[in-house]
Image: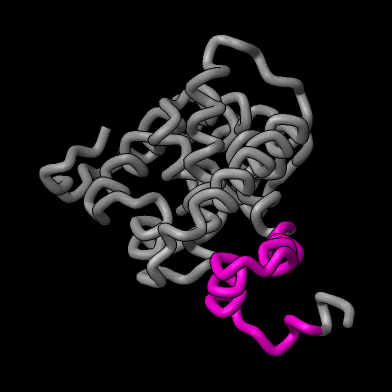
């Protein structure tokens, strides 16, 4: 029987259990189900197809090896997404001093500069935003991407990133504050408007928010 057909009635948790029990095809079905979303997360975070591909590959190898540690306290998708985000953060740290390729990344809906009424060249704007995101420390960049680009709630982002909600809020605040001056020219193309100051966020939990 085709593995896809055999697994069609199994949810993700059942597939994980099948994998840890030695089924050779179960993990491949998980990858098939979620690879597009995993790729999207990596691409949005890293902005480079080769880097994203390498991060996803590293993450899937880690997930395959660590499947026995999955305890079901989070959805399998959240568990996989967390591993991909961590792989992306690791790659950002390793590649911090190396320039990335100039592939366009569509981030024109970022709240730091969104203007629905006057978009001139989205491709160039995307490149500007990606270049600005690359100036952020990896942890801040990951939080901004997860919340502002991928659209996760603070609660879900905290679960995904494995950090307290207060830390997510603090990292997003600090990341947005760094982005605003870098993207001011996109919000104020006529040179007259000013960027609204970013209010102070709630204080993060004791784990810190840098």
Determine whether, in the image, residue 22 is placed left or right of residue 157.
Answer: right
User: What residue appears at the point 69 percent right and 30 percent down from the top-left corner?
Assistant: 51
Instruction: Please name the predominant secondary structure of the magenta segment in the image.
Output: helix
Asked if residue 191 is among those painted magenta in the image, a careful observer would answer no
Determine which quarter of the picture holds residue 129.
top right
User: What residue appears at the point 75 percent right and 21 percent down from the top-left corner?
Assistant: 101
User: What residue appears at the point 66 percent right and 43 percent down from the top-left corner?
Assistant: 56
In the image, residue 88 above or below residue 92: below
The quadrant the N terminus occupies is bottom right
Type of colouring: one colour
Kindly tell me whether residue 3 is visible in this rendering.
yes
Determine the residue located farthest toward the top in the rendered image. 97
| Residue stretch in magenta | 6-35
**Most foreground residue, 68 or 72:** 68
In the image, residue 52 above or below residue 110: above
The quadrant the C terminus occupies is top left
Determine the residue located farthest toward the bottom in the rendered image. 9
Find residue 153 and report its horizontal and vertical position in percent.
41, 64
Determine whether, in the image, residue 41 is placed left or right of residue 198.
Answer: right
Find residue 12 and report its horizontal and vertical position in percent.
59, 75
Find residue 13 and report its horizontal and vertical position in percent.
53, 76
User: What residue appears at the point 38 percent right and 67 percent down from the top-left corner?
Assistant: 71
Determine the residue located farthest toward the right in the rendered image. 1
**Most foreground residue, 204 or 188:** 204
Find residue 2 and report its horizontal and vertical position in percent.
88, 78
Asked if residue 13 is among those painted magenta in the image, a careful observer would answer yes
**Most foreground residue, 115 or 139:** 139
């Amino acid at each position: 029987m085709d593995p896809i057909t055999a697994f069609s009635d199994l949810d993700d948790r059942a597939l994980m259990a099948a994998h840890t029990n030695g089924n050779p095809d179960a993990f491949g079905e998980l990858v098939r189900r979620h690879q597009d979303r995993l790729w999207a997360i990596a691409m949005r975070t890293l902005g480079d197809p080769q880097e994203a591909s390498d991060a996803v590959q590293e993450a899937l190898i880690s997930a395959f090896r660590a499947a026995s540690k999955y305890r079901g306290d989070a959805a399998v998708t959240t568990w996989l997404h967390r591993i991909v985000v961590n792989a992306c953060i690791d790659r950002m740290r390793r590649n911090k001093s190396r320039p990335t390729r100039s592939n366009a990344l569509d981030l024109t809906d970022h709240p730091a500069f969104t203007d629905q009424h006057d978009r001139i060249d989205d491709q160039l704007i995307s490149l500007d935003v990606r270049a600005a995101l690359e100036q952020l420390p990896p942890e801040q960049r990951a939080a901004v991407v997860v919340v502002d680009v991928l659209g996760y709630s603070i609660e879900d982002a905290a679960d995904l990133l494995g950090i307290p909600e207060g830390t997510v809020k603090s990292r997003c605040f600090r990341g947005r504050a760094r982005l605003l001056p870098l993207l001011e020219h996109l919000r104020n193309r006529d040179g007259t408007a000013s960027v609204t100051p970013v209010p102070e966020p709630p204080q993060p939990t004791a784990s810190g928010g840098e």
